[in-house]
């Protein structure tokens, strides 16, 4: 039975179980940040709107020094007062979009990602109330918006191109959000983790192509394989210094 055809209670139960299967807290020693890299956490806030799984994203203020106008998840750098990566993600989401921490049902922590500049990012998946309306902090966020999570695995909605990073051919995906005067381009890290979460929730757990390895069409590869290989490549061989 397709996830989107379930009643809401069954749908939420299915989401909880699927995300739990990819929760790195259940996989052994919790991975720490590599030396020389900063540590951050983000919240992947999902909700069920009229039987449809949606994800809440933000477009950063154009006035920010780092990643201006980028489409991102709520989140930020880990503070010395944060007890965990989950605490970081929840604190930042409350600061940026007014999401009360007690309203978030944490479902899991996905495998680490890497972003500019030299930052290891821990993605926390959280289920939020279906009636939550973001109240953005204008100094950080231009606007927040919901979009269907399934859009990220709907071929006609996604654009692809490849680029080369020090000899490694990388697949880049992007998708456009548009609602009246509000527009946003979701790409890079954000698009990858939206796609990853969509594949987990909707059961398309074959692979998440990050590396341009079309020769074997990712036969036998797991959902995390390319993400982990890319993470290890970047953190072992070079540092991402750009703030753009």
Image (cartoon, rainbow, N blue to C red):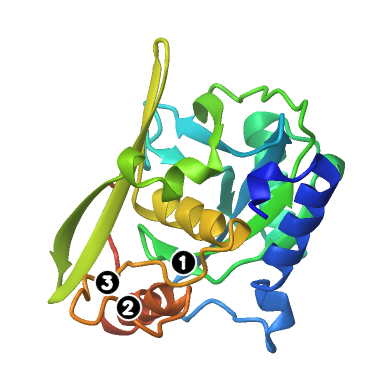
The tag earlier along the polypeptide, 2 or 1, is 1
Name the residue at 68% across, 84% down: 27
Left or right? Give the position of 177 relative to 174.
right
The residue identified by callout 1 is 113
Left or right? Give the position of 176 relative to 79.
left
Q: Are marks 1 and 3 in contact (CB under 8 Å)?
A: no
Between disc 3 and disc 2, the foreground one is 2
Q: Which mark is residue 218?
A: 2
The answer to whether 161 is drawn above or below residue 200 in the figure is above
Q: Residue 44 at x, y = what percent?
A: 61, 49
Between disc 2 and disc 1, the foreground one is 2
Name the residue at 36% across, 59% down: 117
Query: Can I make out residue 84 in this image?
Result: no
Between disc 1 and disc 3, the foreground one is 3
Classify 10 Å Cα crowding around label 3: few (below 14), some (14-19), many (20 and above). Answer: many
The tag earlier along the polypeptide, 1 or 3, is 1
| Residue 239, quarter of the rendered image | bottom left
Name the residue at 21% across, 70% down: 212
Quadrant into which the N terminus falls: bottom right
Name the residue at 55% across, 27% down: 144
Q: Are marks 2 and 1 in contact (CB under 8 Å)?
A: no
Query: Can I make out residue 60 in this image?
Result: yes
The answer to whether 2 is drawn above or below residue 237 in the figure is above
Foreground of the two, 15 or 28: 15
Left or right? Give the position of 95 relative to 17.
left
Q: Residue 175 at x, y = what percent?
A: 35, 39
The residue identified by callout 3 is 211
Badge 3 element: loop
Classify 10 Å Cα crowding around label 1: few (below 14), some (14-19), many (20 and above). Answer: many
Foreground of the two, 12 or 161: 12
């Amino acid at each position: 039975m397709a996830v989107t055809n379930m009643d809401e209670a069954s749908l939420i139960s299915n989401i909880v179980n699927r995300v739990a299967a990819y929760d790195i807290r259940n996989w052994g020693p919790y991975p720490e940040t590599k030396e020389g890299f900063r540590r951050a956490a983000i919240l992947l806030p999902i909700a069920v709107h009229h039987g449809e799984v949606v994800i809440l994203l933000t477009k950063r203020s154009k006035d920010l020094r780092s990643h201006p106008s980028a489409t991102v998840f709520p989140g930020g750098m880990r503070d010395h007062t944060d007890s965990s990566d989950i605490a970081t993600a929840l604190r930042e989401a409350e600061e940026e979009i007014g999401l009360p921490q007690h309203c978030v049902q944490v479902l899991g922590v996905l495998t680490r990602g890497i972003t500019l500049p030299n930052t290891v990012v821990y993605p926390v998946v959280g289920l939020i109330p279906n009636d939550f309306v973001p109240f953005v902090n204008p100094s950080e966020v231009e606007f927040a918006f919901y979009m269907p999570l399934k859009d990220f695995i709907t071929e006609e909605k996604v654009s692809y191109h490849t680029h080369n990073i020090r000899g490694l051919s990388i697949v880049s995906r992007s998708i456009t959000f548009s609602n009246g005067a509000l527009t946003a381009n979701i790409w890079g890290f954000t698009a990858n983790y939206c796609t990853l979460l969509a594949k987990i929730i909707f059961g398309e757990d074959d692979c998440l192509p990050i590396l341009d390895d079309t020769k074997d069409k990712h036969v036998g590869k797991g959902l995390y394989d390319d993400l982990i290989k890319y993470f290890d490549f970047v953190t072992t061989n070079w540092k991402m210094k750009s703030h753009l």
